[in-house]
Image (tube, rainbow, N blue to C red):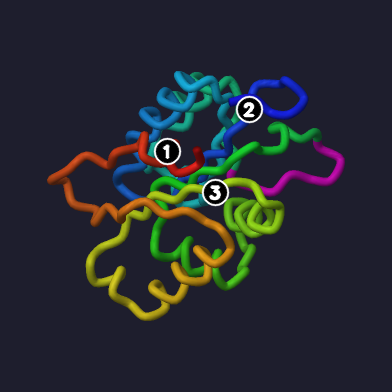
Amino acid sequence: MTSQDDKPPFLYVVVCAAGVAADVGELITAAQRRDWHVGVIATPHAVNGFFDTAAVEARTGRPVRSAWRRPDDPRPFPDPDAVVVAPATFNTVNKWAAGITDTLALGTLCEVSGLGIPVGVLPCVSDALAAHPAYRESLVRLRGMGVRFGDPHRGREDGAFGWERALDLIG
């Protein structure tokens, strides 16, 4: 996959605070094998011990972003050709569907939703939270905006997260 101006395609990976986030390097490696360049945007809680930010920065060659930049700061990432949210938590899915932009990750998701950029999501929620009416309504709203969802991972240790499924969602 290449972007229209023959630059390598750029993938934003949005990482939320869930235990499986520790293995986000698997997604980055899989994306790079598919010739994506990758930049990671994490929720503020995710950068506080949910994954090894130094290892991710070494693998991508770019800083992990979790805070807004000042208007005069240079943009550390080019515009995305696609976005993957993995793992996507109950909190992030609901705030995104509601249009809440209180973090860089949510602001980015709200913005790309209006640009026609492919977005793939791998939810990581418990069965109880997945049954919550607000969550079900958020899925309906986001799907109506063109967001593609993989099957949810229930946050248990009894199965692999299946990181590559996220790349299949964005084509």
Q: Whole-Å distance between the Cαs marked 3 and 1?
A: 11 Å
Identity, as a three-letter code, of the amino acid under mark 2? Pro
Q: Nearer the viewer, residue 5 or 103?
A: 5
Q: Earlier in the sequence, mark 1 or mark 2?
A: 2
Q: Identify residue for label 2.
A: 9
Quarter in which the N terminus is drawn: top right
Residue closest to the far left: 158
User: Where does the image place residue 121, in percent across and percent down from the top left?
Assistant: 44, 51
Q: Secondary structure at mark 2?
A: loop
Q: Secondary structure at mark 3?
A: strand
Q: Which residues are magenta?
A: 66-73
Q: Where residue 119 is drawn, which disc sits there? A: 3
Could you classify mark 3 by the number of other residues whose Cα lies within 10 Å: few (under 14), some (14-19), or many (20 or more)? many
Q: Nearer the viewer, residue 88 or 142?
A: 142
Q: Are marks 1 and 2 in contact (CB under 8 Å)?
A: no
User: Where does the image place residue 39, in percent across and percent down from the top left?
Assistant: 58, 32
User: Where does the image place residue 60, in percent across and percent down from the top left?
Assistant: 54, 23
Identity, as a three-letter code, of the amino acid under mark 3? Val
Q: Earlier in the sequence, mark 3 or mark 1?
A: 3
Which residue occupies 37% across, 80% down? 133
Q: Are marks 3 and 1 in contact (CB under 8 Å)?
A: no
Identity, as a three-letter code, of the amino acid under mark 1? Asp
Could you classify mark 1 by the number of other residues whose Cα lies within 10 Å: few (under 14), some (14-19), or many (20 or more)? few
Q: Nearer the viewer, mark 1 or mark 2?
A: 1
Q: Secondary structure at mark 1?
A: helix
Q: Quadrant of residue 134?
A: bottom left
Q: Identify residue for label 1.
A: 168
Q: Whole-Å distance between the Cαs marked 1 and 2?
A: 15 Å
Q: Main secondary structure of the magenta part?
A: loop
